[in-house]
Image: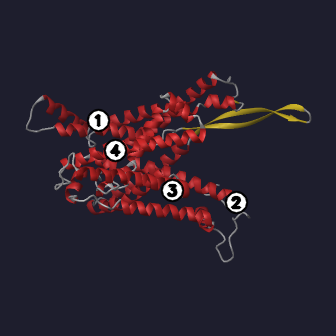
Amino acid sequence: MVRQNSPARGEPVSRPQLIQSMIDAMRVPDLRDKILFTFAMLLIFRFVAHVPVPGVDTQALSQAFQQQALLGFLDLFSGGALANLSVAALGVYPYITSSIVMQILTPVIPSLKELSQEGDYGRQKINQYTHYLTVPIAFLQGWGQLTLLMSSGVLPNVEFGLNLHTFAMMGSLVAGTMFLVWLGELITERGLGNGISLIIFGGIVASFPQMIGRSFLQSQDVSGLMLLGIIGFAIIFIIVFFNEAQRRIPVQYGRSVFRGGRMERQSGSSFLPIRVNTAGMIPLIFAFSIIILPGTIASYFRNPLDGGFVNTVATFFTNTLDPSNLPYWIAVFILVVMFTFFYTIVIFQQQNLADNLQKNGGFIPGIRPGQPTQDYLNRVIIRITWGGALFLGGIAIIPYFVTELTGIRALTLSSTSLLIMVGVALDTMRQLESQLLMRNYEGFID
């Protein structure tokens, strides 16, 4: 195939590379099918997200979202389905939780650790266990969400408890989660990009127009909106910069080959890329889940008419861990930094970089193989993780300061949403670029 970088007859001589690459992608039949299949699956997801559970009071549901910060956080991973209390209200969050649990347990449980080292078979078995664990997690999460919504009067005509109606609703929610996971895996297998990430991405993008429109209707401060837009673009630039930042450690490879009746030693050089933000968005998920939970539980025990010890403790947690207060965001920052270090160390322990280098005949110049290499890599990882941890901590607390600066509360600039969107967009573009380069087309980034 000839490299497709010259304009066809009748086309403009110059064209932006991004637009040209998109046109080239649509010209390749199998790549075009992947793109169209991905869009079709996302369209099905958006239809499912609007199929409501019977008996929902939409006005009470809207008020519950204004009062409960946990609902807004969980709605992020449901792609807006929880805001409609649809059959897909749990989204893919139970699957994400299950995946995180399996990643943490793999280096701890010997049988799982051995299984992870058995290649494709081991990965398939761990993926199967992840799916099994998703079902009980989805059931428990669905029970918690319905309990929370019942206390807000969202389901006024439903008698919630151990009865057939409740289990039918729970079954619908669990089935909706597994259906979305299945759609995501179909996208990963036959489409373009990571399917689970794209479903979250699609839900966030779908909710943005409504959020922006509401902010324009409720806010008369045009300068504040312009400042909010500028800050948003600045955050996107910072996210791209840190997501692409990496420390390249030089690696030398040596091997022996038999040539001309004698053994010769050949060598080559490469590098080991260690990303500054290895943990991705996982620390943010951990931090927000933990920081929101105490306040949510405390709200059940708070009684303004009771002046006892339980009410005092519940009031303290409810007021302190409120997203409108500064202590809440300080706690979020500390938790994000802690979880970033924890998750990064877990990830690198699973990779066994020093052992893999030694098995493949590789070594870091000036560092002895084995344990000295492991100690050196650990020092490098700890140093650069400080940059990633402070970056994620800053991303987590930016919404509070942006809201205080612009004075616009109708539109919450969720930096977590931006982090997810930018990360998914970059990964999808890389996959599309690699597909184009394999077919001798120009990619997005040259």
Mark 1 Cα within 10 Å, few/some/many (few <14, many 20+)?
Answer: some
The alpha-carbon separation of the residues under discs 1 and 3 comes to 41 Å
Q: Residue at x 46, y 32 (%)?
A: 105
Residue bearing the label numbered 3 = 187
- Choose mark 1 or mark 2, whichever is in front: 2
Quarter of the figure with residue 439: bottom right
Residue bearing the label numbered 2 = 440
The alpha-carbon separation of the residues under discs 3 and 2 comes to 24 Å
Q: Amino acid at mark 1?
A: Pro
The alpha-carbon separation of the residues under discs 4 and 3 comes to 37 Å
The alpha-carbon separation of the residues under discs 1 and 4 comes to 13 Å
Single out the residue that lies furthest toward the left. Answer: 305
Q: How many marks?
A: 4
Residue bearing the label numbered 1 = 327
Q: Quadrant for the N terminus, please.
A: bottom right
**Rendered image: mark on residue 401:** 4
Quarter of the figure with residue 445: bottom right
Task: Choose between 349 and 176: the one closer to the eye.
Answer: 176
- Choose mark 2 or mark 4, whichever is in front: 2
